[in-house]
Amino acid sequence: MNTDVIITKNISKTYGTGDIKVHALRHTNINIKRGDYIAIIGPSGSGKSTFMNLIGCLDKPSSGKLFIDGTDVSQLNENQLATIRREKIGFIFQKYNLIPTLNALENVSLSTSFAGVKNKDRLKRAEKLLGMVDLSKRMLHKPSEMSGGEQQRVAIARALSNDPSIILADEPTGNVDTKSGNRIMGILEDINNKGETVIIVTHDPNIAKRAKRILKIQDGVVSEENA
């Protein structure tokens, strides 16, 4: 069922005050449906990260309304935003953001501890997710003992740990070789094929072309291109 999972109504984001203002995002109106697979492209400084931070509830718009699953998150306080992030959104970061002192299993299971999941159940789910990204034999290894591609797959498993309906991936192939990048994109596409909404930021036009929709951001203005 293709219902809207993210709706932006004239949202803008401005940083600074007085005469020194940066209009990072301008009057954006976008509808993203459940099960969409979207690539966000644009040059450095165009507003891509700002847009991702807003739809990921890491920041709030300066004006306009932003709805996640029908909830106007632009009106929520920080604790309420944290709940939305925990329950609905999985983040995959370009630099992995794994905890270096923890092994893969611990990194993946940690995020579910904040949701009050019992330790036994957390570890069982983490094992299942690491198996899904073909890391069953590496789950007791720490990040320093893994390749970039393996670390990114751990990051994907961690992003899925709370069973989110929206996956946000910031340059998911930016720090890995082509073979690992294709493997990572294959995993994300499998996730999308199961009905989850996947949104990626990328500088790579070949990666962007794999998406169903392409959003281009230039000087804070969002427009849609044909995928």
Image: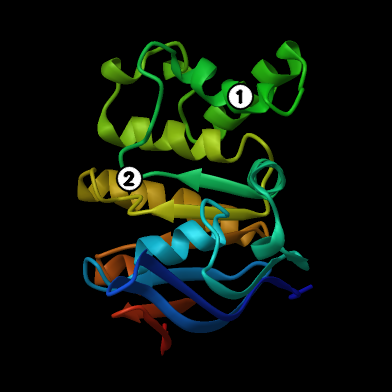
Left or right for 144, reference 151 = left
Q: x and y percent of residue 110 in the render?
A: 58, 21
* Residue annotated with mark 1: 126
Left or right for 63, reference 73 = left
- Whether residue 200 is visible to the viewer of this picture, yes or no, is yes
Q: What residue type is labelled 1?
A: Ala
Instruction: Tell me if residue 125 comes above or below residue 76 in the rendering.
Output: above
Judge by depth and name the residue closer to the eye, 91 or 19.
Answer: 19
Residue 103 position by quadrant: top left
Residue 94 bears which disc, if any?
A: 2
Mark 1 crowdedness (10 Å alpha carbons): few <14, some 14-19, many ≥20? many
Q: How many marks?
A: 2
Residue under the point 60% across and 40% down:
160
Q: What residue type is labelled 2?
A: Gln
Q: x and y percent of residue 70 in the render?
A: 78, 68
Question: Which scheme is used to colour this image of the protein?
Answer: rainbow
Counting residues from the N terminus, which is met first, the one under dot 1 or under dot 2? 2
